[in-house]
Image (cartoon, rainbow, N blue to C red):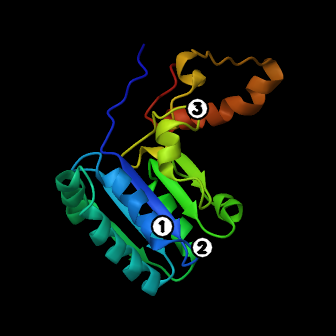
Amino acid sequence: MGIDSIAGPSDVVVIADSATDPRLIALDLLAQAEHDELAQATLITPDAAFADKVTEAVATELKTLTRTAIASASWERNGAVLVVKDLEEAVALANRLAPEHLELMVDDPEALFAHVRHAGAVFLGRFCPEAVGDYVGGPNHVLPTSRTARFASGLSVFDFMKRTTFLAGGPDALRRIGPAGVALAQAEGWKPMR
């Protein structure tokens, strides 16, 4: 079908404020880290004290997982806790990272979501962890990884549809746009035939 892509490693970015339970953020980060040793789990927060609490919670929860070895290796190699000046900077950084999964664990996730430009799937609010998308929520679980959310979307019905573009114009349109086409062709090295 020609719709496949090279996928992986899986990743999550969590933007959270200090009103969120640090243990729940730790569990969300580790739910991604336990996928495989190359998985990436990142917390972005404007609160340094909260960042420390999440880091402590990750260390505590790592001891309880059945996939501790995998999650530990992933967290050690690819995990990150980033402290930013505010939520605006957090979402700007998330857009640069273009994550497969983006969790907005803040008081007003919809306001922050309005600024998201690049993410495979976004999970809004403290009661919508990424695991919901993994198992029971959303239209699919086939999402762009490795920053490809900058130009790709999650799998949808549009991936199974073939589209053909078309263009039509009359003599007036050609007179108006033709010179621009000639200029571009000449810039590429085309020379008119005599």
Labels 2 & 3 near each other (Cβ < 8 A): no
Nearer to us: label 1 or label 3? 3
Q: Which residue is mark 1?
A: 93
- Judging by the rendered image, the residue that carries numbered circle 2 is 88
Estimate the x, y position of residue 22 in percent, counting from the top left: 45, 72
Up-down relation of residue 176 to residue 113 (above or below): above
| Dot label at residue 139 | 3
Which residue: 61% across, 32% down? 181
- The quadrant of the picture occupied by the N terminus is top left
Q: Secondary structure at mark 1?
A: helix
Circle 3 residues within 10 Å: few <14, some 14–19, many ≥20: few
Separation of residues labelled 2 and 1 (CA atoms): 9 Å
- What's under tag 2, amino acid-wise? Glu
Task: Relative to 12, say whether 184 is above or below.
Answer: above
Kind of residue at disc 3? Pro
First along the sequence among labels 1 and 3: 1
Crowd class of label 2 (few under 14; some 14 to 19; many from 20; radius 10 Å): few
